[in-house]
Amino acid sequence: MEFIDLKAQYQALKKDIDAGIQEVLENGNYILGQPVKELEKELAEYVGVKYCATCANGTDALQIALMVLDIQKGDAVFVPSFTFYSTAEVVSLVGATPIFVDVDERTFNIDSQKLEKAVEEVIQEGKLKPKAMIPVDLFGQPANFDEITRIAKKYNLKIIEDGAQGFGGEIRKKKACSFGDISTTSFFPAKPLGCYGDGGAIFTDDEKLHELILSIRVHGKGEFKYDNVRVGLNSRLDTLQAVILLPKLRAFQEYELVNRNQFANLYTAILKDYVKIPIVSEGFLSSWAQYTILLDSQEERDFLQVKLKEAGIPSMIYYPKPLHKQVVYKDYNFNLEDLKISEELSQKVLSLPMHPYLTEETVKNICDKVIQIIGEFRNGR
């Protein structure tokens, strides 16, 4: 059994993917070829924004967003502590300071009340200038952008939406990757929309920001390749990845997102009386990058994972250590008492197999095994 079955997806899309790759090999246009422009157009239309620029990976997408918004030393950027390191890493890379904020236990996304509290505390302390926030659409569900937008307007903060896991999610029919001043996503193979290597994209409705993004992703170019007007990155999407993503994007829209939600709903229906299941807020749609359950203790979680592995069922822990506990941030000492939920989640979460090519029978078998193992643990093994 695969945790994310990329092989099954390839078999379903093999004809179109192979044809696209062959065409690139024959025409020899490997970097930012015409299929890249076609992909950017389709991505922008799907998300519902004016502009999309692809890039080399999701981390570069975040860094470029920060560079475009001129985030630098002395600036505070607010990020959730329960997420992947790159969300904070890019803040440090541009010289700014990440301020970690706790998350909601059931949605796993940034806690808007604690976000506002952290912003006010940074202002009161007076050492850093609050400049931006990077809410993450964790596990497929968009963050609470109603409240996030209110807070951003109140304190004049920029929003960079980290939609690395959220592509396809919605809030009242408005798509993820459309909520920030700049929004980003990742095409890492395991993402809801993934390529066969690294890739990313940056979305905005602001033409001037888009022009800066296009410049920074190619060495800060000006009018042409050898006219360099600013410091930039080398962060271009390969044409091969674009021709892989194009049929995947169409399949994602036609049936994969629907399948993900059907399998997530089945997980929830069977497991809701045995574990804490993920909650999708009213009016929200998740793209279910992961289906993540919450156990009663770390011991129960670890016991379940070991026994699932023995039964041939893969699982993953996202994330075993919150960001404020990472060695790289060992000197971090701001609002530590407000980060307890992130610490607790890291000890109790477990993600089960999730992808569009599961079957109802497979999901039911996984659930039966989960229930059996939990029963063993709670009854003293």
Image (tube, rainbow, N blue to C red):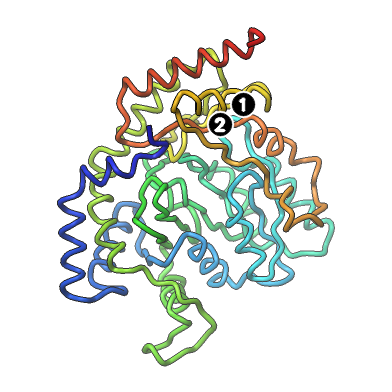
Label drawn at residue 301:
1
The percent coordinates of residue 355 (x first, y second) are 36, 36
Residue 326 vs residue 74, the one in the foreground: 326
Q: Which amino acid type corresponds to the residue marked 1 in the rendered image?
A: Arg
Specify the farthest residue to the top. 379
Q: Quadrant of residue 265?
A: top left
Q: Which amino acid type corresponds to the residue marked 2 in the rendered image?
A: Leu
Please tell me which residue is depicted at 71% across the width and 72% down the height of the picture.
73
- Assign the C terminus to one quadrant of the image: top right
Relative to 181, 44 lies left or right: left
Q: Is residue 3 visible?
A: yes
Q: In the rendered view, tell whether residue 206 sits above or below residue 80.
A: below
Please tell me which residue is depicted at 36% across the width and 40% down the height of the picture.
173
Secondary element at tag 2: strand
Relative to 46, 128 lies left or right: right
Label drawn at residue 324:
none
Marks 2 and 1 close (CB-CB < 8 Å):
yes
- Assign the N terminus to one quadrant of the image: top left
Q: Classify mark 1: residues with Cα within 10 Å, few (<14), some (14-19) or many (20+).
A: many
Look at mark 2 in the image and give the residue it sits on.
350
